[in-house]
Image (cartoon, grey):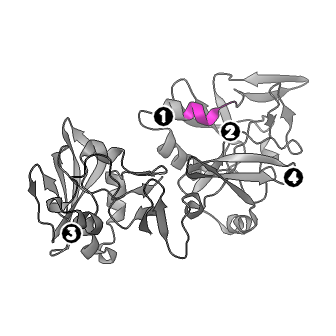
Amino acid sequence: MLDEVWHRLCAVAILTVSVVSHNYAAEFKDYRDGRVYRGIPSGSLNWFKQSLKYSKTSHFTDENGIPFYRSESWQASCPEGSQIPDETDWDELIEDKFSGSDKMQNMSDFVGNSSRGFYKFEEDEVVNARKGFVYFAVRGPANHAIRLETKRGTTKYVDIEEADAVQIRCVFPRDQFAEKNISPKDMIFTDKRDNKKYKVGVRGGKIWMMKNLAFSVTSAKQCYVEDKSFCEKFGRYYTYEDALKACPPGWHLPDDGEWRDFQKDRATLDWDNLGQGGCQDWDNFCDGFNSGHYWSKSSVQENTARSWEFNRSDKDIERTDVSVYKGLYVRCVAD
């Protein structure tokens, strides 16, 4: 996705980082005019939370003080170290933010105070067209834009006229290790809630905890055979409801898609780590020394959710549907 030019831009990007509720939120300073843009993280990119306000390459500024740009100036408009997103970038954002039950709220948050419509220039008249939508530039073919409809949470790629002007949202690369306060040298994350430390690694393009979560959200009876020493060794058991809220801020319980990506290259899995600890089934326990059972966020039906079982003796993985009241382990994934 990132070409040679993009890599050169990234090398000179100047970022600032601020701390909000124990999470790291990237900001980007445009040194051409001193403006600072907050980042919205999605995939490998941060998106400007506000429309670009660099006026020197814009063609028109509306009554809200937001510049609009013709396609002839798009390439030169984003500050060095950032660029206009292409269709692939937009598609990944749509999949991440504008799908599912929260899509309308997420789109409304993304659009924020951006102006509606785009501007057409007809002879001596400036016309704000299509006010029910928000239009942003798309890198690639000339005059290609994306249309967002916040009332329905829908998106559509459109072609505009050469003289038309739209808003710009720039993107810049994420430093997910800095966001999570992880040193790339030791790859250790510290959970600020209880100061427990977790080795992390990258699988399927995402940062995963390489140890089972050990944060206590309910009673103390969350350990294999109710022995606290096993909580230190294997982590804690969680019901499905507790698993959904167990990960620290900035992390989440993986869904089935993320688990599929995690286990694709089975030869590189740490079977001795994954395939131990068993599970808790009411007052009984599964085999704790040959299997490990993990929650997926993907629910199946009422009172049933998805489990991923790793068996270290057979080097086998099973995906099954289990009662939400069973006790399984949690592996957290960075947002």
Q: Residues within 10 Å of mark 1 (few under 14, many from 20)?
A: some
Q: Which residues are magenta?
A: 107-113
Asked whether, in this view, residue 330 is left or right of residue 18, the answer is: left
Q: Nearer the viewer, residue 246 or 230?
A: 230
Q: Secondary structure at mark 4?
A: loop
Question: Which of label 3 and label 4 is nearer to you?
Answer: 3
Check disc 1 and report the residue beneath it: 103
How far separated are the C-alphas under marks 3 and 2? 50 Å
Instruction: Give the mark nearer the N terminus: 3 vs 2.
Output: 2
Check disc 3 and report the residue beneath it: 276
Question: Which of label 2 and label 1 is nearer to you?
Answer: 1
Check disc 4 and report the residue beneath it: 32
Check disc 2 and report the residue beneath it: 136
Asked whether, in this view, residue 177 is left or right of residue 15, the answer is: left
Q: Residues within 10 Å of mark 2 (few under 14, many from 20)?
A: many
How far separated are the C-alphas under marks 2 and 4? 22 Å
Q: Secondary structure at mark 3?
A: loop
